[in-house]
Amino acid sequence: MRKTYIGELEEVVLLVTVVLDGQAYGVAITQEIERQLNRKISVSAVHSTLHRLANKGFVTSHMGGATEDRGGRRKRFFKITSAGSQILQEIQSVRSHLWNQISPNNLTI
Amino acid sequence: MSHISTPPKWINTMLRRLCKEQLLEEIEGDLLEYYKYWVLEYGAKKANKLYIWHAIKFLRPYALKRNKITHPTPIAMYKNYLIVSLRNFAKNRVYVAINAIGLGIALACCITAYLVLAYNIEFDDFHDEDKVADIYSIHSHYRLQDGRNVKSINAPVPLIPIVAQEIAGIERFCRFHREFGTVQHGSNVFNEGIAFADSTFFDMFDFPLIQGTHQNFKDRHSIFINQQMAEKYFGEEDPLGKTLDLTFINDTKIQVMVGGIVDKIPENSTFGFQSIMRFEHVQNINQFDPNDWSNWREPSTFVQLVSPENETLIEKQLIPYVKTRNEAYDQTHVTSFQLEPFKKAFSRDDTGGGYVGMRQPSAPLIVFISMAAIILLIACFNLTNTTIAMASKRLKEIGVRKAIGASKSNIMGQFIFETLIMVFIAMWVGLAMAQYIVPAFTDMWGIGLTLSDLNSINFFIAMLVLLFAASMLAGVYPAIFNGRFNPISLLKGNIKAQGTNLFTKALLTIQFALSVVVLIGGVVFMQNSKFQEGIRLGYDKDRLMTAVIQSNAEYDAIKNELIQYPKIEEVGVTDHHIAGGSYMGVITIDTMEYRVRHIGVGKNYLETVGLNLKDGRLLDLDREADQQNAVVVNKAFLDHIGTQHALNQTVTLRQRDYKIVGIVDNHINNLFKNNNLVDGKSEPTIFYPANPAHYKLLVVKSRRIEDIYAVRDELERIWEKNLPHRPFDFLFQDRYALADSKETNANLKKIFFFLTVLGAILSASGLFALASLNIEKRSKEIGIRKTLGASVSNILNLINREFAIILVLSVVLGSAGGYFLTEMLLETIYMLYIAVSIWTVLICGVFIFLIGISTTSTTIWKAAKANPIKSLRYE
């Protein structure tokens, strides 16, 4: 039994954070989701999801260096924590466990 | 792009204010990054919009700043506000009283306007929503001869019984009609309006009964009456099962039995009736065949569908009957029959009511609501001005409050709170006044609705909204005004009471201009009612009187006895009557069609009313030939058809040929303007012989004007001797022809008088407040001037100058406005009136000016007379 739950959007954001490997910040994550998942999402929604993930202890963050692009404002980069990695693994294993029990014939489209 | 666009600054300020500091940098950074992308993609304008939208989306709970310090509920502070405001009110009793009364009257006006509004909003709330959900009314759409399209809630008598048989999907139907008749029980005889409905009426619509059962209506000879009517005819007796004897036109006698007593029906309902009986009797009374499509009596018709989805289907199936109807009756042309949900809102603006009640038309509604709003606005502005004036004495208080930590918003809150208390007091005054104003108003306009009839929850909400709206209107400006002072300069005494500024001056000018407008209106309507009483309408209006009869036999019974009375000059009988009951219709001359007024007359009628004969002769209806094919026309008729030699011309009227035997002078039906008017003065009119079976009005002319009361007494005596069981329903022609315009004039006069007094009081009090404020500001100046030798009149002139300018400006504006508005109003209502004279306008303007200037003068005079030492020692 898991103590902390993770929502679908949270899972996506968390995965993308891992995909971006150290370069994950608000805009990058948003654009990556739009590009890869073809899913419309606003930057504010991503921010609030990241905030929730941080509260649950699945991500940590640090401020990057000053940038010219953003009127001198720094970026906040997110990185997955071990708790975050663990939960992603867990989700994956639960899913594959379930998938293994499904015979292909039962999946009618 | 050559220049770099930046997002709007205010949105960033907002973000900075609302968002947590530690999150701000990343949020702003990300937004800005996106913004650059948007500018490239969509251009600066759309990018700005997107930026604002996304910035607003960032205002989520996680990102918002938390208040670090939570204040304990500041009850002590509110208590202090309350005490301070009450003390302050006690110190300025005169201002408070003026404002409470002024605002109270304004709120009472708003309550009155709300009553009219609620009439429409709560219309038919009496009927349960679910119960009538599948009931529809049939609307007939007509095209008139002049090309106008009108619709009305009625349908031909045979339509729905036939349709219900031929078409599936109609559960039941009900037709609703009204007739006038005489009701008798023992010695109680009165003329009454009676409603008629099919036996399904009480099945389709809920009407609670006090006595009896709804089942009794299934009996053809039952009548249901209301409490009031039960008391009128039966007094203390138990009315249930008692009989009433009814007499209708064509001398139809019907005996009915009381089957139930209906509980009170609200005035704003589709069905309002004193008594109701079965629809089948309408056929007997008017002697028509229920399957005859050519019958012009079209009752209001309602159908209950098996399911509401069938509406359009059934509407479609009604189309063939349009043709049937038009072929049978060609006086009006029906274009379609439509089904409309019972609860759908229609007003008299665009829909004729048929025989049912309807919502109030929107034009007077708008007028009343905007009038109430204007008065409320004036009263609120007054409160604004006086609050600022009163606050000027409390600048030190504000300074101290600010010095010990009150923020700008605290001070604003305090002042708005004070205004709220003030408006609350005024609201009680208003509610008390409404007890008098509302009945006076509803009596005037014949709306039988009282405040107690209204839905109390709605009323409470409306009052609450009114309370806060008025407080905000009046309170916001003083609150901002007082909140923004710098505490240091306040305590140092650098800031003195602010004098009049452009804002308050403008408010005052508008107030006085409106006072002038309403005064002019009142005076002009007073003049017009005098003038209209003196108009000769082209016949012997002042010597005529009428009484309602029901048959030619009744006329014959008393005619001879009447004519022997020496003070009576002529006696006649008629169906229609000048100034009432006639209709517009189409006649044909040589295949050309003309639209003229039709007046069906009886024996000796034209002689009696005294229309001036110009050519030919009048009708002699004792001769069969005249009764069959003779008509008389008026001069306007000749002008209308464009000939002067119409004598002996043949006219086709209702498919029958008539010969014009006489031409009479024009007369005036009534003083109201109506759509049918052709040349602006008199209508083309044809007087045709009415069927003697339709005679319903006895007309008597006295020899001299002074004799009319003696003639009336004699008429009544002869009536009672010969027709003891018939009610004596009598009117002087003066009342008959002018009653409506007299009433309109009187109503307008009352309303304008009321508004004038109200406007003058409010404006004068506003001026008083402003003048006091001004003197306060200049008290030192007055003191110095006086010590240097200025006289009281010098000072009066000096300070009055500013107000004189305001007053002159508002008098000029008000006079112009009053002139045009009143002229416009007169023109839309009446065709004969005296125009607004320059003298009236001038006198009204000067009058208001004098009121204003005397208000300021007395205020200034008091200050100017005061000992200058007092004002110089001040501080």
Image: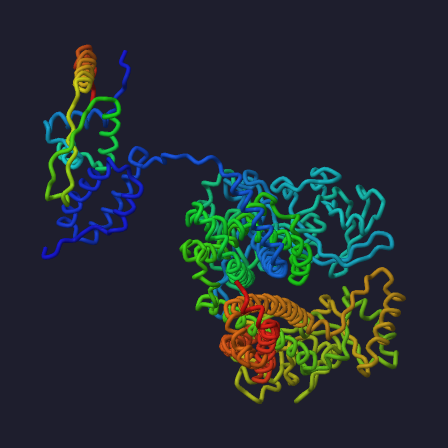
Q: Residue at x 73, y 77 (%)?
A: B605
Q: Is residue B163 visible?
A: no
Q: How far from the left and from the top, in percent, is residue B115?
A: 60, 54
Question: Which sits in the foreground, B296 or B26?
Answer: B26
Quarter of the picture containing the N terminus of chain B is: bottom left
Q: Specify how the rendered protein is coloured.
A: rainbow
Residue located 55% across and 63% down the image: B375
* Front one among B692 and B450: B450
**Count of numbered tags:** 0
Q: Is residue B668 above or below residue B764?
A: below
B269 vs B706, left or right, is left
x 72%, y 37%: residue: B213
- Residue B613's spot in the image, x, y percent? 69, 87
Nearest the camera: B839 or B610?
B839
**Is residue B400 placed above or below B742 in the rendered structure?**
above
Image position of B563 with respect to B171: above or below: below
- Give residue B559's quadrant in the image: bottom right
In the image: residue B835, left or right of residue A101:
right
Residue B233 locus on image (x, y percent): 82, 51
Q: Position of residue B455 (x, y in %)?
A: 60, 45
The answer to whether residue B345 of the structure is visible from this angle is yes
In the picture provided, is B577 more to the left or to the right than B850?
A: right
